[in-house]
Image (spheres, rainbow, N blue to C red):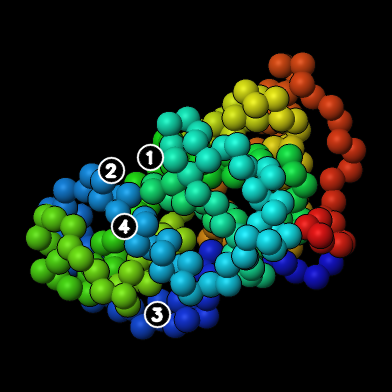
């Protein structure tokens, strides 16, 4: 099977920005800034919006009549307000397989993910990302991304307050945010949120199981550093699938989906 690369960096331009960033020089500044910085939920929301606005401008976004947008709106149109969060959804038409949500309520789904996931699997994956926002995991990720971007300016990073970033820094911040990883505990809690979201809305919770099974299949034999990095701090996808199965069996909601495989044709028509 042809390898499918799961990449957290969206654009080649963002890759080049990351290559220009001097990590060795910035390391001390980031540490100093992290100690001094007061980072609030409002800061996380503001910087998240700036990052997402930048990504929206620098990616191919599916239009309102695009089949990807139509499908996403059909699935999540009734969840624009979810658990106290005001959410907005868009699709990036890119080859990478990913989805993310930010503190400002922005949810972005990659078209290639929609090509291989069923409706229930997408509900589970996006529910997981919403869980990261609700649990404020994205606040931590955005703070770290901001410090990496602001490290270009020692005064901004160490001042104890969130500074205004220029366009180049916002691009680097967006890149760093997507490259951030959550702890195993945060991932496990987001998995629980996703399952509860599915159950509360009477969706088929087995979708969470099969979504993880597909991620496990994608990871088999992968030697791509970006893919490996994504999973280094995450619980194993196969173990996560089995955790969903165990809970579904306990709740009386388990239905054997049979053999789970990566579709050979796109599921978004």
Between 73 and 83, the one nearer to me in the picture? 73
Mark sitting earlier along the chain (4/1): 4
- Which residue is identified by label 4? 47
Disc 1: which residue: 136
What is the CA distance from the residue labelled 4 to the residue labelled 1? 14 Å
* Residue 237 image point, x, y percent: 66, 45
Mark 2 closeness class: few <14, some 14–19, many ≥20 residues within 10 Å: some
Please tell me which of labels 4 and 3 falls first in the chain.
3
Asked if labels 2 and 3 touch by Cβ distance under 8 angstroms, the answer is: no
Measured in 3D between alpha carbons, the distance from the residue under mark 2 to the one under mark 1, in whole angstroms, is 8 Å
Which residue is located at x 20 percent, y 66 percent?
Answer: 164
Q: Give the mark nearer the N terminus: 3 vs 2.
A: 3
Q: Which numbered disc flags the more N-terminal residue, 3 or 1?
A: 3
Q: Position of residue 46 (x, y in %)?
A: 30, 54
Residue 1 to residue 197: above or below: below
Find disc 2 in the rendering and name its residue.
41
- Nearer the observer: mark 3 or 2; the answer is 2
Task: Say which residue label 3 marks.
Answer: 17
Q: Residue at x 46, y 51 (%)?
A: 106
Quadrant in the picture for the C terminus: bottom right
Answer above or below: position of 205 versus 182.
above
> Circle 3 sits in a helix, a strand or a loop, which is it?
helix
């Amino acid at each position: 099977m042809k390898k499918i690369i799961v990449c957290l960096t969206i654009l080649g331009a963002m890759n080049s920005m990351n290559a220009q960033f001097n990590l060795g020089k910035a390391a001390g500044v980031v540490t100093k800034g992290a100690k001094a910085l007061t980072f609030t939920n409002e800061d996380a929301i503001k910087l998240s919006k700036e990052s997402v606005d930048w990504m929206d401008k620098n990616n191919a976004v599916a239009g309102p009549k695009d089949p990807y947008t139509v499908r996403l709106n059909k699935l999540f149109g009734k969840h624009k307000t979810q658990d106290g969060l005001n959410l907005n959804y868009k699709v990036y038409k890119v080859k990478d397989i990913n989805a993310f949500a930010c503190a400002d309520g922005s949810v972005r789904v990659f078209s290639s993910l929609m090509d291989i996931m069923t409706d229930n699997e997408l509900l589970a994956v996006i529910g997981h990302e919403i869980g990261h926002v609700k649990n404020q995991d994205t606040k931590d990720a955005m703070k770290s991304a901001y410090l990496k971007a602001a490290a270009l300016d020692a005064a901004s990073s160490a001042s104890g307050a969130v500074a205004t970033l220029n366009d180049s820094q916002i691009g680097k911040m967006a890149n760093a945010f997507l490259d951030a990883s959550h702890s195993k505990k945060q991932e496990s809690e987001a998995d629980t949120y996703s399952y509860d979201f599915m159950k509360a809305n009477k969706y088929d919770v087995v979708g969470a199981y099969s979504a993880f099974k597909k991620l496990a299949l994608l990871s088999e034999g992968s030697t791509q550093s970006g893919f490996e990095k994504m999973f280094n701090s995450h619980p194993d996808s196969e173990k996560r699938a089995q955790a969903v199965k165990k809970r579904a069996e306990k709740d009386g909601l388990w239905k054997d989906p049979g053999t789970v495989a990566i579709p050979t044709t796109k599921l978004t028509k």
